[in-house]
Image (spheres, rainbow, N blue to C red):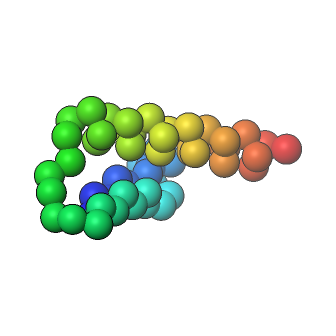
Amino acid sequence: MYSYPIFLGEKPFGVLNLQSVVTREFTEDEIYFMSVIANLILGAVKMRKRL
């Protein structure tokens, strides 16, 4: 399992979890992809709050 924290400024906003069926190490590319997805989710939530 890999957990990526999501922050809204200095405040914690949530966590995005990635799970695997087998025990293994996640690659740098997978971790980077998680950060991209987390930022996309945060951007969508911020836009939704403005509406």
In this view, the residue in front, 26 or 8, is 26
Instruction: Tell me how many marks there are.
Output: 0
Residue at 73% x, 40% y: name it.
47
Q: Which residue lies furthest to the front in this view?
A: 22
Residue at 61% x, 38% y: name it.
43
Q: Where is residue 19 in the image (x, y as percent from the top left)?
A: 33, 62
Would you say 50 lies left or right of 29 here? Answer: right
Relative to residue 24, is residue 50 depicted above or below? above
Q: Which residue lies furthest to the right in this view?
A: 51
Is residue 44 visible in the rendered image? The answer is: yes
Quarter location, residue 2: bottom left
Which image quarter holds the C terminus? Answer: top right
Relative to residue 2, is residue 30 depicted above or below? above
In this view, the residue in front, 8 or 25, is 25
Q: Position of residue 38 (x, y in %)?
A: 47, 45
Is residue 12 visible in the rendered image? The answer is: no
Residue at 44% x, 50% y: name it.
7
Would you say 4 lies left or right of 50 here? Answer: left
Quarter location, residue 1: bottom left
Relative to residue 33, is residue 42 depicted above or below? below
Relative to residue 20, is residue 9 depicted above or below? above
Would you say 30 lies left or right of 39 here? Answer: left
Residue at 43% x, 57% y: name it.
16
